[in-house]
Image (cartoon, rainbow, N blue to C red):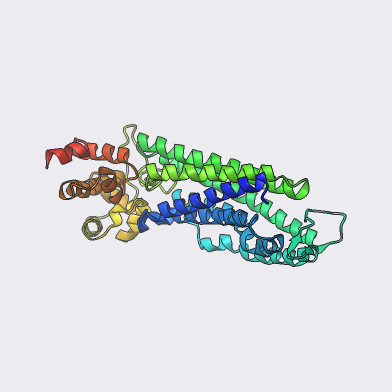
Amino acid sequence: MLETVDILFLIVSVLGAAQAIFLIVLLMDKEKRGLAANRWLMVFSFSVGMSFVDDILDPLINPLMNLYLVPVFAPFFFAFFPSIYLYFCEISGVEASRPYRHFLVLFPVTAAIGLLVYLKRARMVVDGEYGRDDGLTIAFSSDGLAEFVLLGTVILFCISFIVYMTGIWLRARHYRHQTDWQTQADSKRLNRWVTELLVGMTSLFTVFTLTNLFDLFVLQSEWLSLAVKAAFVLVFFRMCQVIAQNPTLFVPSDPIDAVASTAPVFEGMRKDGDPLTPRAFVDDETAARIRTSLDRIVTGRDTMFDPLLTMPKLAAEVGVSPNQLSFVLNRHLGKSFFDFVNQVRIEKASRLLIGEPDRTILDIATSVGFNSKSTFNQAFKKVTGITPSAYRQKNT
């Protein structure tokens, strides 16, 4: 017979697992161009989803079988922090080298938890078909190896929490600095999303860590654990809502043109924003080659419609440094990186608006790399002088 708390745990866990699956499906639907950063949210969703699956099984199977499943589900807790950290790395433009290294800790953790299960199995008092767990908390007065292994695992978890949360805040700060150089509408929207995610994850991870420490060192509290699980469900719900409203989650900033943290393109800037003395000089032959490469990329690839496109990525496609590319865009084409990309995207969107009248404006906007309908409308009107809906009505 299930108790009230077990029933509530089961309901919350089913909702959480369903939300995790739905969130992963939403993220996978963003096409390959959007998976660079979204994949880490998918890892986070999968990891939390596995903890919900564990909670679903808890009241349905006997305690001994639950014990054997601990090494399967518990290590996923150690994937929460690095997955969110790598997401913030991706959106801030700071590419993490060999990101898989952040998850190597799962192997020793799994081994340690497997040892705990082996040691704890001896403490199980078997009663017929089921086993009654006599509990395993930190007991410093005991002479058991299990307490020592568990304490080491807890310390590792706390260190992971502190290190990764510090990194997440630093990456978020860098990202918000970058978005300040975008259009005002984008900057506000992006900063709101990052702030909401940052504060939400920080609060959730902190409460989650403290709750687990409380369960281990003081007293197991099922109701407190239930509240934390419900909070995860609410976070998933909010993430699904934000993704539905902002299909690609973010648009990377233009740090080179904005004279951000990377090496400056110009020695100085006038108050009106015009460059003074160019530092990255490009001769006419090199400029012509860069322009030819840009034409080839614009006409022959989907690079320009990548929602994660940045100046360094485009420069790598062209085969020059970001400074050289920025110099050619500003001096030879008279455009900033942001204006150049938007021009190409709007031209493509204009053809789609006329050629595919049944497609929605939002669908066309996201297909050419814009993150929301409002951003698309703003850019479209800047280029054409009218809104996308007015353009479609005028030309059909």
Residue 175, position in %: x, y? 46, 44
In the image: residue 317, left or right of residue 132: left
- Side of 359 where 243 appears, left or right: right
Q: Quadrant of residue 244?
A: top left
Image mark count: 0
Residue 321 visible? The answer is no
Between 338 and 359, the one nearer to me in the picture:
359
Foreground: 270 or 135? 135
Q: Position of residue 169 (x, y in %)?
A: 55, 44
* Residue under the point 50% across and 42% down: 197
At 47% from the left edge and 44% from the top edge, which residue is drawn?
A: 239
Residue 226 seen in render: yes
On the image, the x and y values in percent for residue 28 come to 40, 56
In percent of the image, x 49 and y 49: which residue is there?
A: 19
Residue 154 drawn at (x, y percent): 71, 54
- Quadrant location, the C terminus: top left
Query: Residue sitting at 27 percent across and 38 percent down?
Result: 377
Residue most extreme to the top? 271
